[in-house]
Amino acid sequence: MVSAVVALLLWSCTAQIVSSQTVTAAPASSAPPSISLTEAIQRAQANEPIFAASMAENKALALDRSIARAALLPTVGYHNQFLYTQSNTPRNQTGHDFATQSLPIFIANNAVHEYTSQAVVTETFGLQQLADVKRATTASARAGAELEITRRGLVSAVVSLYFGALASEQKLKVAQRAATEADAFTDLTQKRETAREVAHADVVKAQLQQQQRQRDLADAQLLFDRSRLELGILLFPDPGTPYTLQAADTSAALPTRAEVEAAAARMNPDLKSALATLRLSEIDILSAKSAYLPDLALNFNYGIDAAQVAAKGLNGVQNLGYSASATVDIPVWNWLSTQNRVKQTQIRRDAARVALTATQKRLIVALDEFYAEATSVRNQLASLDTSVQTAAESLRLTRLRYTSGEATVLEVVDAQNALTTAENAREDGAVRYQASLANLQTLTGTL
């Protein structure tokens, strides 16, 4: 009976251990996420602090525009005040209740006890308020353009890191293949040396090549790990999160030059930002000149300003009433400060024009450079693929000739190096094409 109970307990503990191991191992069996370029860009926009700051600034300036528009509308407030003034002892008949009341000691105050409860409506008309609205609207437009500049810069960085990581993965495979090839060739030379078909010098040369390929493999592994960590910073809260990247498509066709030029002229954020900056400087001139003109201020008050907190005072006197005022302040002399402010804004306007011209020239140059590079690299991709195929065939034939004693060890080593170089050049060419195509797409706003 005791042995049966012990056996049952052991079986129960074993089942719990197996169950806990299964639960613990379940997350490890889940496959890492496969990230596309579009998803990488979306993740980077959610994690990159500079882009988040630019987004926040754009939203804040949009609210400034709403605030400036609200300043054109009348302001309404409800004013409540109790004022006590020391009595001056003599009494006088008040106009509120036709009764005598102690006079206040201060001339400016109306009574010893004074209560104010009034709705106040104020409106100011002037060129400055209109200029503020225009400025806030233009500043919001410029912030939108600068947000787009930041977004496209982030996209360009993500594209570079994304395809750089893909290229480092392919180069790691190339280094692994080259290391395997060097190991196999070293084994071949050792066997031929044992068979007294080649000298020991062939073995030494093959071993040197093998050692170099091992170092290349270590460097390729380091580059692969580093590129994935750098991209992981933009993709995940933990940069060490495992993930895979979807393969690049190098078959994407280039748009025509006319399409690129039309899109760049219509959707380039640098040009929009420069134009908005120029408009802001012109609005600043208008704002500075508004100091030459008068402002009209309207004020309307309705409520109680009496010695009692009541709609009617003694003897039925009406305490509720209204007052209105209109004020026009005409500037006469301000010691040339307005003239100097106008000159300041005109100087900045001229600098903004120069910046706009420079932006237009940079756009033309960037368009020419990116399109020429994309066209050149696109034409080289087929040649790079052919070079890899040719180098692989050359290595195969050279090894056959070396096995039959018709080629030297140096020829085999040269063929190995040629294949590795061709494969790495093909990966670099693919990255260059994708990067140049992404530069064109960000320049035209299609990515």
Image (cartoon, helix red, strand yellow):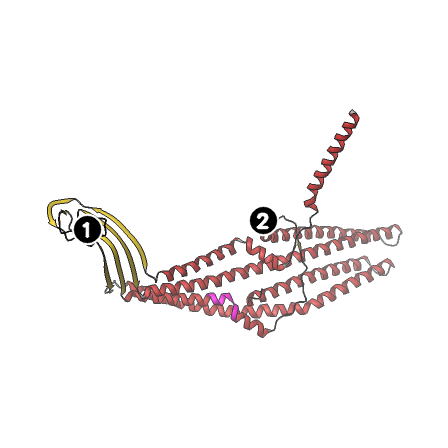
Examine the structure image and report whether residue 268 is included in the region drawn in magenta.
yes
Q: Residue at x 61, y 57 (%)?
A: 39
Kind of residue indicated by mark 1: Gly
Residue that extends furthest to the right in the rendered view of this protein? 195
Q: Is residue 70 left or right of residue 202?
A: left
Q: Is residue 25 above or below residue 163?
A: above
Name the image quarter holding the N terminus: top right
Name the image quarter holding the C terminus: bottom right
Q: CA distance from mark 1 to mark 2?
A: 71 Å
| Residue 78: percent from left, percent from top | 30, 53
Quadrant assignment, res 428: bottom right
Q: Is residue 40 left or right of residue 12?
A: left
| Residue 179: percent from left, percent from top | 76, 53
Stretch of the chain drawn in magenta: 266-273
- The one nearer the camera, 21 or 348, is 21
Kind of residue indicated by mark 2: Pro
Secondary-structure class at tag 1: loop
Please say whether residue 201 is visible from this viewpoint.
no
Q: Is residue 419 left or right of residue 121?
A: right
Q: Residue at x 34, y 62 (%)?
A: 73
| Residue 269: percent from left, percent from top | 50, 65
Residue at mark 2: 237
